[in-house]
Image (tube, helix red, strand yellow):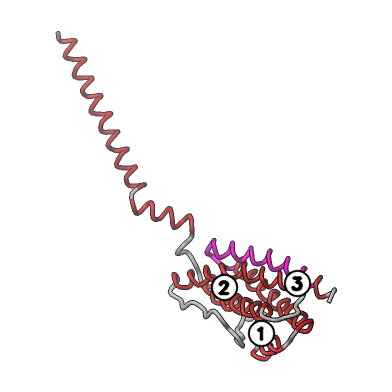
Amino acid sequence: MNKSLTVGAASAALLLTLTGCGDSGTDQSAATTGPAAVTTSVNAENGAGVHNDADVAFAVGMASHHSEAIEMSEMLLAKQGIDPRVVDLAQQIKAEQGPELEQLNAWLTEWGQAPRATTTTGMNMPGAGGGEDTGMMSAEDMAALSDAQGVDATKLFLTQMTEHHTGAIIMARTEVADGQNAQAKAMAQNIITTQQQELTTMEQLLSTL
């Protein structure tokens, strides 16, 4: 009888110990997987709010830059007698840079900055990384493209867009080097890759006109 009581007491004590461990594990899990922890995890994954001054400068500069490139492309696409290969390039630039412009403006809004205008005719602005030439067009440059027709317009577009892309790549490289936001840096790297390829295409097109 005494032996049975002893075994029963020991079993009860063991059960209490295991229950206590289980509660502790539950509390610890809740502390690391509650709403605050989930929010932190999501933010860490998408880098939504993580940024520095270089990221802001990149978004401001590249949004204006993209706006102008889209405007230049629309000017060309409205003309007659443009080489079909250059028409395709202008359409490609619009298709690439339109969504990027929307994302850049979304970041600016999130970071407490004013989004950039969708057109920037005649704007000239310092580089995002400390005064580099960004390749933005002057009012005179944009007027010249607007007035040009046919082959002259085709050549002028390619020449101006070559300068424009070169400036964008400089800005993007500054963001890759100095930025903090992972998504912005990824966009910058994509801009470098894409626009370098388009620079090669434009050089080849110019040589055949």
Q: Is residue 132 visible?
A: no
Earlier sequence position, callout 1 versus callout 2: 2
Is 69 within the magenta? no
- The residue singled out by tag 1 in the image is 137
Q: Residue furthest bottom?
A: 140
Residue 62 in the image: above or below residue 26: below
In the rendered structure, which segment of residues is drawn in magenta? 178-203
Q: Main secondary structure of the magenta part?
A: helix
Residue 119 in the image: above or below residue 29: below
- The residue singled out by tag 3 in the image is 84
Image depth: mark 3 or mark 1 in front = 3
x then y, percent, for residue 49 = 45, 64
* Numbered disc 2: secondary structure: helix
Q: Nearer the viewer, residue 5 or 86?
A: 86
x then y, percent, for residue 8 = 19, 17
For the residue carrying disc 2, how many other residues have a C-alpha within 10 Å: few (<14), some (14-19), or many (20+)?
many
Seen at 23% across and 20% down, the residue is 11
Q: Amino acid at mark 3?
A: Pro
